Amino acid sequence: MKNEITLWLLGIIIIIVCAVQSNAQDPAIDKFERSVGLGSNWTVYFGGSAITIIADSDIGISNSSTLFGIAAWTGSNFEANQYSEAIISSEKIESMWAQVFVRRRTSDAARYAFHWSDLDGKIPGVWDIKYNEVPTPQTRILDSLFAPPPAVGDTLRIEVRTDIITGYPEIKGYHNDKLVVSAIDSTRTKIMNGAPGMVFRFRVGFNPSYPSKVFEEWEGGSLKTITGINNNATEHQITLFPNPVNNELKINFYSQNDFEIEIFNTIGKIEIKNRNQNTIDVSRLPSGFYFLNLKQGVSSYKQKFIKK
């Protein structure tokens, strides 16, 4: 089973680096499938034979045998309605925990929490994780956020945003949509103090404090600023171009059978509806960020685009 992590952010962010650790038979990310950077002067660094491998000792993790693949975005600030997106996949991932590291390669004692650091702007993020397999022995992952341990089939959601009073990251953890923890992390750099040139590492990887092979497979959600809209894994069966678009948006879809198109804005209002048309006139839409939903029978495919 292939595991995918989809990351996309809307708003202002300086640099983000993403990494996935695979199992012992697959010690690096096997494929970097796509990256889109619509901020000004952005460059994407990654993969294929040029995958950057760093030892876990570089980022303060005790298990020195673990290797990580890194994808990095670097450049100037995002402007309004611009985003960056990447899909990183690996055949298997053993267990997971998440943390953000700043460019300084130092260890972090609060190893099992989910941290934002040095973001410029008040950008909320939501990350959903669903367990697929019974861990043996029973093991707590992200244990500083969730107790008792989640059961098989449970859903965890970690929400990170800026506390409007202190400026520090506020972390909320939900277990099956019930709020179980809420804390302001004053050990982090204030989000509002972010500056160009900062580097971030978003990691999903092995937790060295627990036995290996805790979870053989898992499902990852999306880190995003607009909640309530799910990007399913099949969204990549459709392609929109040009993107960004001025006048006519063209849809490349693998099937020409009967289908319905809906275009809606970021608050869910439907702006355009039509049927069986591969070219759509969007010239009258205000500039901004939109979603296209293609329905065919019981299937539904979503894709994002920007109207200039």
Image (tube, rainbow, N blue to C red):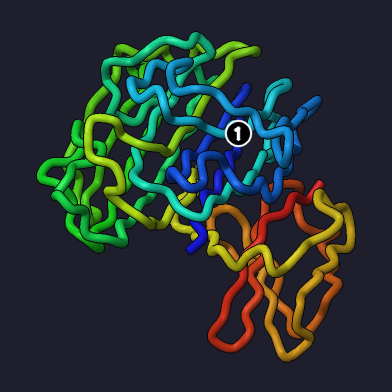
Q: Is residue 303 above or below residue 202?
A: below
Residue closest to the far right: 247
Q: Quadrant of residue 50?
A: top right
Element type at marker 1? Answer: loop
Residue at 47% across, 39% down? 21
Residue 159 coordinates in the image, percent (x, y): 35, 39
Three-letter amino acid code of the residue under disc 1: Gly
Q: Nearer the viewer, residue 136 or 170?
A: 136
> Is residue 191 something that shows in the picture?
no
Residue at 63% across, 33% down? 71
Residue at 43% across, 30% down? 66
Q: Quadrant of residue 277?
A: bottom right
Q: Nearer the viewer, residue 231 or 260?
A: 231
Residue 193 coordinates in the image, percent (x, y): 50, 10
Q: Nearer the viewer, residue 269 or 51?
A: 51
Q: Residues within 10 Å of mark 1 (few under 14, many from 20)?
A: some
Q: Quadrant of residue 295?
A: bottom right
Residue at 31% across, 52% down? 215
Residue under label 1, please give it.
Answer: 11
